[in-house]
Image (cartoon, rainbow, N blue to C red):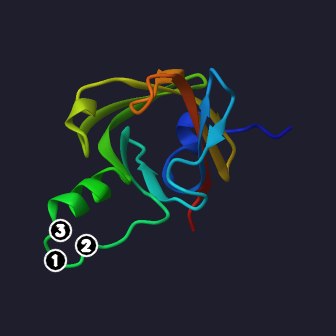
Amino acid sequence: MTTTPPAADLIVGTWRLVSFTEEDLQTGAVTYPFGHKPNAVVIYTADGYVATIFTATDRKPPADATPTDAEAIRLFRSMIAFAGRYEIDGDTLIYHPEASWNEAWNGTTQTRLLEITPDRLHVRSVPVPSTLTGTNLVFSLTWARAG
């Protein structure tokens, strides 16, 4: 008989993003907010820490070492980054960001639904309002174990 380790054991390590989609719950439309090949890594430690950074497919570097205001805004809007604590409760993954690219995330609780195998990690949000349109959406992430 083969047993699968619990999610808390399986999640530990480094993962690379395979897919990031958003589904508009009103229309059913699915979009790729960071493009079809977003660049992202997430690291989960055995003692309950997480760190991640996402960048969009089409990010362009600033023209000079110091970005203009317009370039800085474009770069800010094409990334997500945070670090903090995480916990797993059954099939629920809960983040507690302590530092992030967006100060509004710090000190919040972010709840996700979790499916995990030794080589794949699927994370799905609970319905949340879009910061752009206000409509409810669900985002889904598929990760592959790095290495």
Please state which amino acid type lies under the numbered disc 3: Pro
Q: Residue at x 24, y 63 (%)?
A: 71
- Identify the disc placed on residue 62: 2
Residue ID at (33%, 50%): 77
Q: Position of residue 53 (x, y in %)?
A: 38, 54
Q: Quadrant of residue 26?
A: top right
x 55%, y 27%: residue: 137
Location of residue 116 in the rendering, given as x and y in whole percent from the top left corner: 65, 40
Query: Marks 2 and 3, how far apart in space?
Result: 5 Å
- Along the line of sight, which residue is nearer the eye, 30 or 87? 30
- Contact between marks 2 and 3 (CB within 8 A): the answer is yes
Which residue position is annotated with label 1?
Answer: 65
N-term-proximal mark, 2 vs 3: 2
Give the CA distance from mark 1 to mark 2.
7 Å
Q: Which mark is residue 67?
A: 3
Q: Is residue 37 above or below residue 49?
A: below
Q: Quadrant of the C terminus?
A: bottom right
In the rendered view, would you say 86 is above or below 51?
above
**Relative to 52, is 39 above or below?**
below
Could you tell me the amino acid type at mark 1?
A: Ala
